[in-house]
Image (tube, grey):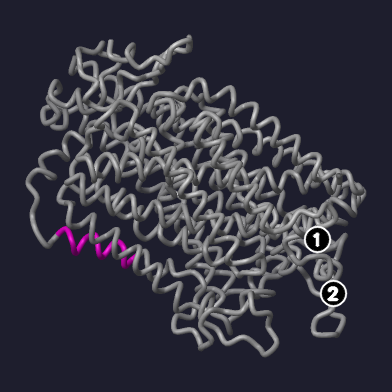
Amino acid sequence: MTPALGMFLLFVLITLGITYWAARKSQSAAAFFTASRRITGWQNGVAVAGDYMSAASFLGIAGLIAFFGYDGFMFSVGWLVAYLTVLLVVAEPLRNAGKYTMADVLAYRLSPRPVRAMAALSTLTVSTFYMIAQMVGAGALVTLLLGSSHVSYELAVTGVGVLMIVYVIFGGMLATTWVQIIKAILLMGGTILLSLLVLAHFGWSLASFFDAVTRVSYHDKGALVTKNFLEPGLRYTAANHGALDLISLGMALVFGTAGLPHILVRFYTVPDAKTARVSVVWAMVLIGSFYIMTTFLGFGAATIVGRDKIAVSGGNNMSAPLLAQALAGDIFFAFIAAIAFATILAVVAGLTISASTSFAHDFYTAVIHKGTERRPGEEVRVARYTAVVVGAIAIGIAILLGKDANVAFLVALAFAVAASANLPVIVLSLFWKRFNTSGAVLGLATGLVASLVLIIISPSIMKVDPAGTAAAARHLIQRPPIFPLENPGILSIPLGFLGAIFGTFLRREPRAEARFAELSVRANTGLGAEKATTE
Amino acid sequence: MASDDQKIPQDPTPIVGAATDIAPLGGPKPPHERTADEEAGVIDWEGLAASGKFRALLKAKRRFIVPAMIFFIVYYFALPVLIGYARPFMEKRVFGPVNLAYLFALSQFFMAWIIAALYVRAAARFDRMAREVIEDHR
């Protein structure tokens, strides 16, 4: 057994222990869906960070910086700034006026069944696509990191899938929360250690570190080139509409994070809106520090390991583990690899519970059974079945796609749907009295369809590959892209808002307007908000 | 209480929060366990929404949140816009090898933290105002 596998199994063992402990406390609906709303501010803040910082952040962004220098670091910025939207606009009203899901806030004023049905569809779309991207990533990582342990892609994907199902169905939100907290602490610890080792490598001198960053040499198309990695333009150029694509990505991050269902449900786990606010601040401290340290991870990999070596040792996603190996040997490599798995597990568990909560609460209870449970505990039971089904579907699709599949666009898609479908209707229902059911349904539908269509006709799916590209990595449609940007936000977000506004003007809904006063008072004062339950 | 029937035999753990679950459990509940929907009828929402104190709370929040949103959106999108359309300017070196592009990107983190800190301070005032709105009602 390799050290990496051993450390990963240790993490699994600890998290299963937590799940066993949490299982006894996760019987009722409030306990299963929201950990009885008794998570404290700092705990929830750390859990939000653990829920949010996916493998795409830890491995992906470190790799982008190692390969494309400054353009990769540009990615880091938006992930933190996005939390200002969460803090200023969404977190507190949502906690005050909702119960289990984002649709609760919409259902206050609007007709619950159509609105919840659309919101559940949007939530399931975002969660499943994001989950598939994470699981393909997990599988690919395992084959790279544990190649010598005979762990295959299929086994890795199934293992991650089964674990996330176990956390969620037995431990509910409480176990999910603690898996995310432990992962966030491990991730921060690993990142701080790596950053310190990089600085030590340069004699604790920031000046010589940045000096090295301005002179990074690597082979490009056979020729040795030396580039200043602090200068923009290695990835985004005028030729590929770089500036527009970055603006579009920024829009998806800044408006999408506040519409991600798995982040929003975290704010129901705290006792009140003030604690929700405190937890966003904790999350911002962790997330910001982490993304600033990607400077050391990414540029460190570029200067110490070098782009050439990373390219032949598994590609840019391996930059952070290879940097660990170069600085402190195989044991540290194993530690960083284990953190990468922990990262994926915590994120997929969060996605699973938000998808199951939305299906059980919004679709099964509210849409099919018109808001009543036929038997006590039915909603939780349905959520548990949903977790198994969603997990099985994600495992199946991830295995079908295979480890070489190009899945980065699924993450872009998840953020685009969250920003274009979810955020407009949340904001308009909270702040616009005239807003109504037809506006919400049309807004959600427009945002969802616009994001899907624009991604399908973007260079992520539509592109002519050069001859000799491996079958699994080929683009699905071998034609020039119709929409030139990889990120659809710049077009799909305005479309989502327009759809919601246009739908609103189609008809008047006196009941929705009459209940605006109630929603506004609830959202802004916390009067009548769901309380923490006592043990 | 309805939650008692639900207990699994031999399990000493109280079934947490069962009484706040969905309607059919029924029966009178202590006030702290009433769900948001059950409180709907007992509060004069229209009157509260029209009260001077509530309007002042909304105005105070708007006066902080709207300018803060506009500021951070302009500051953040200035980064990709400048990188895209004013690259030579952004490549100016400021401290040794460190250029304006990197420093501006780094400043975004501190901008976000400062706005968050200012909001937390302002929100303490919003909390007080919200408490007054609720107390007046009771």
Dominant secondary structure, magenta: helix
Q: Give me the residue at 61% from left, 52% from top.
A: B107
> The magenta stretch spans which residues?
A494-504
- Residue at image point 81% right, 40% down: A6
Q: Is residue B136 left or right of residue A24?
A: left
A407 falls in the magenta region: no
According to the image, label 2 marks what residue? A218
Q: Quadrant of the N terminus of chain A?
A: top right
Position of A235 compared to A265: left or right?
right
Kind of element beneath mark 1: loop
Q: In the rendered view, would you say A49 is above or below A467?
A: above
Q: Quadrant of residue A140?
A: bottom right
As drawn, the label of residue B96 is 1
Q: Nearer the viewer, residue A267 or A292?
A: A267
**Relative to B73, is A190 above or below?**
above
Q: CA distance from mark 2 to mark 1?
A: 23 Å
Write down the chain letter for disc 1: B
**Circle 2: residue type:** Tyr
User: Can you give x and y, in whole percent of width and height, for residue A431 in the image?
Assistant: 25, 46
Left-right relation of A165 to A141: left
Count of picture labels:
2
At numbered mark 2, what does the secondary structure look like: helix, strand or loop? strand
* Residue A377 picture location, percent across and down: 34, 28
